[in-house]
Amino acid sequence: MGGGGEEKAGGREKDPLAPYDDAIFTGEMYKSGDGTKVLERRDGTKVLQRADGVQVVKVQCSGFYCVDVESFQKPGTESDLSTLVTTVKVIVGGVAPLLMPWCIKNQGLLGGTLTIVLVGILSSFTVKQLVEYRDAVSVETGRDDLTYVDVAKHAFGVLGGTAVFGMTLVNSLGICAAYSAFIGTTLSSLSSSEGNIIHSLVPELSSNGFQLAAAALILPMNALASKCVDLTYGFSVTPDIFERLFTLPLFTSPVEYFRSFGVIPLLFCVHFAVLPIERSMKNRQAFPEVLDRATFACILANSLFGVLGFLFFGEETSSVVLDNLGNGSFLTWVKLSLVLDMLVSYPVMLTSSREIVENAILGSETRNSLVQRLLIRTMLISTAFLIAQINDVGKICNLVGGVCQCALAFMIPPALAMRASKNWGRPGSAAGVEQTIPQRTAGRVSPYSPRSMLAYFIIFFGGFSSLATLFSCFSH
């Protein structure tokens, strides 16, 4: 079931089902009712040994039992630091960070900040649930290349896999539509303002015109963008921001709150991208710690940026904070740099939906289907362009993040954890072992355990947030 069986340990082949040679029986029997013993390693960590000698562990977030995953995984090439940087880039890349001041405006200084913290923490937790279930499926099937769709299909059948397929597709196209709308509205505002290069070249060109031009271009340039420009400009025009701190609202109404709630899940919930990132690590067991560090950094940076942006511009804060900046020469080039960033990022974000559709329609025979692939990509870009005709970056991001991202991040991973507890909820039925050891005495986990209640809460949070976001968007 993988490459771990060839590893040497103590001069002999390491058994992937009993990998801890230094584990010693403590004399304690585990309270699972199936004859499981508790072993202790030299470093103080506990290992469980079933009645048949197979050693298993209890995963941290989901609480089910599984054989040693590391024995079945192939290490990648990326260091912990490189993975940290990549994870931060995936979280903060795109339009969502530029909408944080608008989120704080709609949700209040305290309400918005608490939402950023809560969504960031829950997103990190459910990413770990997703990775844990993927690991269990890997040791069950011997596959180490599983996608989110594969995991959902394993847990919930074809219907579950199809649902994740559809939401991932809509999510990817929605993000591309937000990029397109951002490019169109930003360039259109420059085109209608005298004194900049865009007005000189293409005066009074509409947002749709720029979106069409962007859809036809892929520019080979590196991304250039910085929030520091917004903050520097804000301090220059609003030196008394700390006085404003006591005049702006701490909380807002529920309707106002959910008009921008979805932007925050859009920022943090990158579940569709984390499995390849985790697979690329040299030390894959360190991924949870790396993820926590990346999440903490993004929570801190985006909370500060959102609060300061709202303090700078107050009730005039636009959905994209760049609209609050002037049109001086330097600021014009900053906006153009962000537009170039979106143009470069557009094909990257389209990749997930493109691969999903191409694999579904063409299967593995994609090398000999150039015309079909071009048609599919043209169709996807056209669909994103049509979505972008909403011409409201905030509304597009709110819908995509509040509906698709909430489902992918806050409904499916907890449901996976509950399914895993049902399938592998005791050592005798651990994932990765063909033989199931029956219970001899009572030892079943209560359905009302803290982990189960937390899973129910997260699912309720995701479902309620999705419905509230839909209601708020279409009632406005």
Image (cartoon, rainbow, N blue to C red):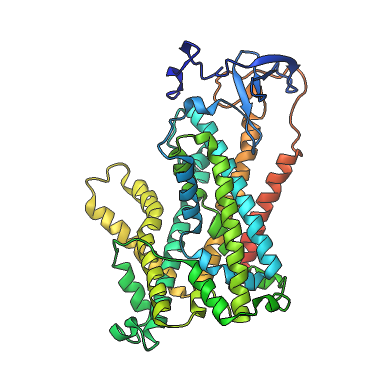
Query: Residue, x 43% and y 30% (percent of image)?
Result: 74
Task: Looking at the picture, tell me which residue is in the foreground, 88 or 372.
Answer: 88
Query: Residue, x 50% and y 12% (percent of image)?
Result: 10
Q: Tell me where residue 7 appears, x and y as whole percent.
A: 45, 19
Whether residue 158 sits left or right of residue 53 in the image: it is left
Q: Is residue 403 visible?
A: no
Whether residue 460 sits left or right of residue 375 in the image: it is right
Toward the top, the furthest residue is 11
Q: Tell me where residue 340 appears, x and y as whole percent.
A: 36, 67
Query: Residue, x 52% and y 49% (percent of image)?
Result: 271
Q: To which quarter of the image does residue 289 belong?
A: top right
Query: Residue, x 54% and y 65% (percent of image)?
Result: 399
Task: From this view, report whether residue 149 is shown above or below residue 269.
Answer: above
Whether residue 126 sits left or right of residue 249 in the image: it is left
For the N terminus, the image quarter is top left
Instruction: Give the total number of marks visible in the rendering.
Output: 0
Task: Looking at the picture, tell me which residue is in the foreground, 175 or 341.
Answer: 341
Q: Tell me where residue 142 appears, x and y as whole percent.
A: 45, 27
Q: Is residue 92 visible?
A: yes
Task: From this view, report whether residue 56 is shown above or below residue 202.
Answer: above
Task: Looking at the picture, tell me which residue is in the foreground, 176 or 429.
Answer: 176
Q: To which quarter of the image does residue 188 belong?
A: bottom left
Task: From this view, report whether residue 32 is shown above or below residue 215.
Answer: above
For the C terminus, the image quarter is bottom right
Task: From this view, report whether residue 336 is shown above or below residue 435.
Answer: below
Q: Tell me where residue 297 appears, x and y as whole percent.
A: 57, 54
